[in-house]
Image (spheres, rainbow, N blue to C red):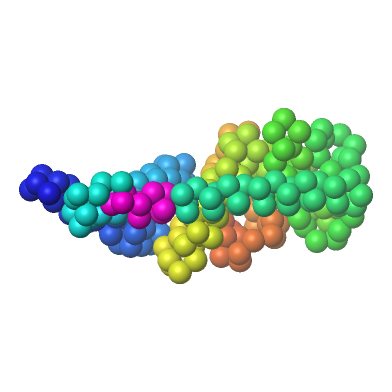
Amino acid sequence: MTLAELAAAAALILVAVLLAWPVPILLSRAAWPARAPGWALLLWQLIAVAGGFSMIGALWLVGLALLPQWPLLAALPAAALAAYLLVHLGITIVQFERQRRRHLALLQLLSAPHPTHARTRVLDDAAPVAYCLPRGIGSVTVLSQGLLDGLDQDELAAVIAHERAHVEQRHEVLLVAFKAWRDALPWFPIAARAESEVAALVEMRADDSARRTTRDEVLARAILRVAGPAGPAEHASSRRDRHRDRFLRLSF
């Protein structure tokens, strides 16, 4: 193996280590992603893609260093890792689609169409609930009766705009990809942290999209009054903290 090949292998290993631990930790602890969730989401995607390719490339170059006479054999560990990650991605996509179809079938039984909002269904539930069910051009926004009773028309419009932003920006694609990463590497703590951070950032991104058609104070009130869709409590807490600060600034 030449000096240049050794240097390339060492560089890829260094990049893989940096992207596997210190860089995601620093990003998850930074304050700026809450102010620019779109850029933060892009950075998480770059970290995931670059990290995966650097791990695969590093395995390939190390294999070549150990087995220079058998290049195909040397490439087997890298090929196995790539196949492992792709298989998990495929499994996660299939599971997501099955769950989506089952959820949609239950919705047809347990909910009714909203009288004025297209592609919106209402659950007879006193808890304030709002979420979207992606299905291409047939995506459905789900609202509970408790939510409809607890919000005024402006606040309700803000919530619907938030949910529609998830659909229009295809946030489910990001969530599925990072879930596949976590499922493929359950022993890898950064994979779980990345999934959690991305889940929180897509909520913030949808909030910011809703701000284009909704006054800040209206959206802030809606966020503070609504429990939010099912998910980790820290996601709802981070959104509420973010909009509570904005609401307080607007109030004085």
Foreground of the two, 148 or 221 = 148
Q: Please give the name of the residue rendered at 61% of the width and 64% of the height, measured from the top-left corner.
A: 232
Q: Please give the name of the residue rendered at 46% of the width and 42% of the height, measured from the top-left corner.
A: 38
Residue 226: x percent and y percent? 71, 57
Pick out the residue farthest to the left: 3
Image position of 150 (left or right of 110): left
What is the tally of numbered marks visible in this picture?
0
Q: Specify the quadrant of the image occupied by residue 248.
A: bottom right
Residue 76 drawn in magenta: yes
Residue 246 drawn in magenta: no
Residue 72: x percent and y percent? 31, 46
Pick out the residue farthest to the top: 137
Foreground of the two, 225 or 96 = 96
Image position of 178 (left or right of 52): right
Image position of 210 (left or right of 19): right
Residue 100: x percent and y percent? 74, 48
Q: Please give the name of the residue rendered at 80% of the width and 61% of the height, measured from the top-left corner.
A: 127
**Is 50 situated above or below 231?**
above
Residue 76 seen in the current view: yes
Foreground of the two, 207 or 20 = 20
Q: Please give the name of the residue rendered at 73% of the width and 49% of the height, measured from the top-left corner.
A: 98
The rendered magenta stretch, by its main secondary structure, is classed as: helix
Residue 210 seen in the current view: no
Q: Which residues are magenta?
A: 73-82
